Amino acid sequence: MKYTFLFILTAAVLSCNVTDKKDASGQAASTVAADGKAALSDSASTTTITWLDPEVQNLGAMKKGQVAEISWKFKNTGDKPLYIANVTAGCGCTTPDVPREPIAPGAESVIKAKFNSENFSGHVTKEVYVMANNSNRNNGTNNKLSFTADIK
């Protein structure tokens, strides 16, 4: 119950922080999330991702309560802009960071997440799901990244 409440509270706070931005011409530009979701449904807008870091990472041994930062570097290897529409975690213990700007063809970026081990012990495996307009998704409609840790 506590995790459900924290998840809903986090989602509500994050959704309140969405604002319209102006592009270089001074016109209002829609958020990347909106552009990314539109690009997801348009097959002419798909591109490809090459993960430069392993999609499954091992954090090794951690002390209970320790917070670890994980990152997955990637490159847009297609010929269209890459839109990260959403990044979600499998539970409230992992907080992902979403790249807000489109990633140009040939450019590199990173997906980051923080994992709080406070409520865990033993071996854990956690997932981060990336929804983007890439055609080479490894998990159906999204890209699945994961990490493991041994909590002492």
Image (tube, rainbow, N blue to C red):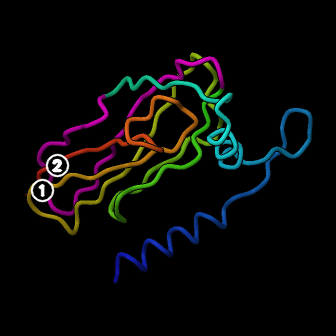
Mark linked to residue 98: none
Left or right: 64 in relation to 106: left
How packed mark 2 is, by other alpha carbons closer than 10 Å (few <14, some 14-19, many 20 or more), is many
Left or right: 127 in relation to 64: right
**Residue 77 or 31: which is nearer the viewer?**
77
How packed mark 1 is, by other alpha carbons closer than 10 Å (few <14, some 14-19, many 20 or more), is many
Q: Quadrant of the C terminus?
A: bottom left
Q: Which residue is mark 1?
A: 151
Residue 144: give x, y in percent of width and height: 37, 43
Element carrying mark 2: strand
Left or right: 126 in relation to 61: right
Residue in the picture at 92% in, 39% down = 26
Q: Amino acid at mark 2?
A: Ala
Residue in the picture at 33% in, 27% down = 53
On the image, which quarter does residue 5 sit in?
bottom left
Separation of marks 1 and 2 at Cα, in angstroms: 6 Å
Q: Are marks 1 and 2 in contact (CB under 8 Å)?
A: yes
Q: Is 8 situated above or below 33?
A: below
Residue 128: give x, y in percent of width and height: 37, 49
The magenta stretch spans residue 75: yes
Q: Amino acid at mark 1?
A: Ile
**Residue 117 or 124: which is nearer the viewer?**
124
**Residue 50 or 73: which is nearer the viewer?**
50
On the image, which quarter does residue 12 sit in?
bottom right
Looking at the rendering, the stretch of residues picked out in magenta corresponds to 54-80
Residue in the picture at 20% in, 42% down = 59
Residue 139: give x, y in percent of width and height: 38, 41
Mark linked to residue 149: 2
Residue in the picture at 38% in, 35% down = 138
The magenta stretch spans residue 55: yes
| Residue furthest right in the image | 26
